[in-house]
Image (cartoon, helix red, strand yellow):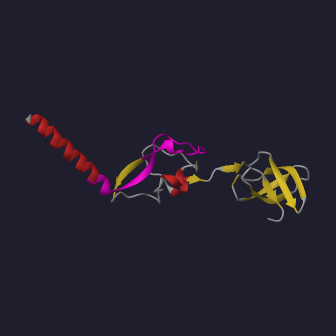
């Protein structure tokens, strides 16, 4: 009976210490698996970890998992390590050197062609693209469907 009482007291003290530790630290999302450059981050790849208040981060780190979900890793992210803000980016919809549809629309006129982006781009970014037919380099904005819209925007 005494040993049962001692076990109960020990469990209560461990639970209290754990709660005190979490209230005294910063809870940050960290990878639960290794995430490689270009991988899209999902919620299942993340877990929370408590860091002491006096822990010195080398750079600004992401504090919310909502910021990370759907982003692409720019470098390898190791399990259990805080995620620097500059190590994630919006996913690229167009890839440098890969043929992409280019679109010009004005009024009722719509012209579609093929171009080769000179750099990769995410949604809404302005990129230069080389028109395959004319060889001219033009500037356009990346659309949600992966096409590049050129002309008046």
Judged left or right of residue 71, residue 114 is: right
Residue 146 rendering spot, x and y as whole percentages: 74, 50
Q: Nearer the viewer, residue 97 or 26?
A: 26
Judged left or right of residue 54, residue 77 is: right
Residue 123 rendering spot, x and y as whole percentages: 69, 55
Q: Nearer the viewer, residue 48 or 56?
A: 48
Judged left or right of residue 130, residue 66 is: left
Residue drawn at 11 percent across, 35 percent down: 3
Q: Nearer the viewer, residue 11 or 24?
A: 11
Residue drawn at 80 percent across, 45 percent down: 99
Residue drawn at 81 percent across, 49 percent down: 101
Q: Which residues are magenta?
A: 20-47
Is 13 part of what is drawn in magenta?
no
Q: The N terminus is located in which quarter? A: top left
Residue 129 rendering spot, x and y as whole percentages: 80, 54
Residue 38 rendering spot, x and y as whole percentages: 61, 45
């Amino acid at each position: 009976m005494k040993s049962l009482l001692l076990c109960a007291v020990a469990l209560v003290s461990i639970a209290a210490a754990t709660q005190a530790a979490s209230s005294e630290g910063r809870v940050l999302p960290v990878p639960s698996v290794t995430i490689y450059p270009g991988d899209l981050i999902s919620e299942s790849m993340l877990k929370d970890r408590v860091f002491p208040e006096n822990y010195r981060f080398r750079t600004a780190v992401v504090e919310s998992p909502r910021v990370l979900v759907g982003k692409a890793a720019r470098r390898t992210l190791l399990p259990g390590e805080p995620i620097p803000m500059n190590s994630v980016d919006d996913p690229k919809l167009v890839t440098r050197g890969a043929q992409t549809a280019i679109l010009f629309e004005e009024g009722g006129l719509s012209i579609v062609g093929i171009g080769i982006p000179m750099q990769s781009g995410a949604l809404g970014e302005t990129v230069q693209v080389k028109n395959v037919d004319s060889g001219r380099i033009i500037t356009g904005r990346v659309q949600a469907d992966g096409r590049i819209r050129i002309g008046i925007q």
